[in-house]
Image: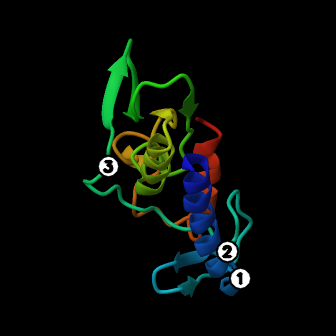
Amino acid sequence: SGSHLATTQIDHIAAATHRCNARNTTIGSCSSKNKTATAQPTKMSCCPPSALPYLAAKPATKGSKKAVDGVEFYETGAQSKAAVILFPDVWGWDSGRTRALADAFAEQGYRTYVPKVLQPAFQGGTDGDGLPPDFDLGSRMDEFMGWVKTV
């Protein structure tokens, strides 16, 4: 069934993250494809110690960017009786991980919206929202904590 497929996709993402988390106990990056991790010194964090870094949106996203009354958002999926509003992680509304999750909900029959809400963006962010793709949470946590209090 459709809901089983969505659960399977989300379980797959969670399992890949868990495999990396089990191997990586410090802040760093992890590739679920290669099951490798790069460690950096551990610091107090808002995110799990082995949170994945920015993931670029691939051109194959299924939705589109829109704006209504000055509010920008990513919209994906057909009209439906139910909708999902998916708030982005610290990388913002144009993060590939966020767009992939929105498209996965859309594939299960839910109109899905991702609002552009992390503003002001830190140093331009990603498409004017959230953190820039090259931001290193591990080494710049103090800057991140100062910024996150402003959004």
Relative to 149, is 66 above or below? above
Camera-side mark, 1 or 3: 3
Q: Secondary structure at mark 2?
A: helix
Amino acid on which disc 3 is placed: Thr
Q: Secondary structure at mark 1?
A: helix
Report the side of 49 relative to 37 (left or right): right
Mark identifier at residue 61 = 3
Report the side of 30 relative to 44 (left or right): left
The residue nearer to you, when weighing 86 against 8, is 8
Residue 31 picture location, percent across and down: 49, 79
Residue 21 picture location, percent across and down: 67, 77
Rate crowding at label 2 as few (under 14), some (14 to 19) or many (20 or more) other CA atoms within 10 Å: some
Pointer 2: what residue? 18
Is disc 2 in contact with disc 1, using a CB cutoff of under 8 Å?
Answer: yes
**First of labels 2, 3 by sequence position:** 2
**First of labels 1, 3 by sequence position:** 1
Q: Secondary structure at mark 3?
A: loop
Relative to 111, is 13 above or below? below
Q: Residue at horizontal 64%, vertical 75%?
A: 27
The residue nearer to you, when weighing 40 against 19, is 19
Mark identifier at residue 97 = none
The Cα–Cα distance between marks 2 and 3, rounded to whole angstroms, is: 25 Å
Q: Residue furthest front?
A: 1
The Cα–Cα distance between marks 2 and 1, rounded to whole angstroms, is: 6 Å
Q: In the rendered view of the protein, which quadrant contains the C terminus?
A: top right
Residue 148 picture location, percent across and down: 61, 44
The residue nearer to you, when weighing 114 against 10, is 10
Looking at the picture, the colour scheme in use is rainbow
Residue 51 picture location, percent across and down: 61, 67
Amino acid on which disc 1 is placed: Ala
Amino acid on which disc 2 is placed: His
Mark identifier at residue 22 = 1
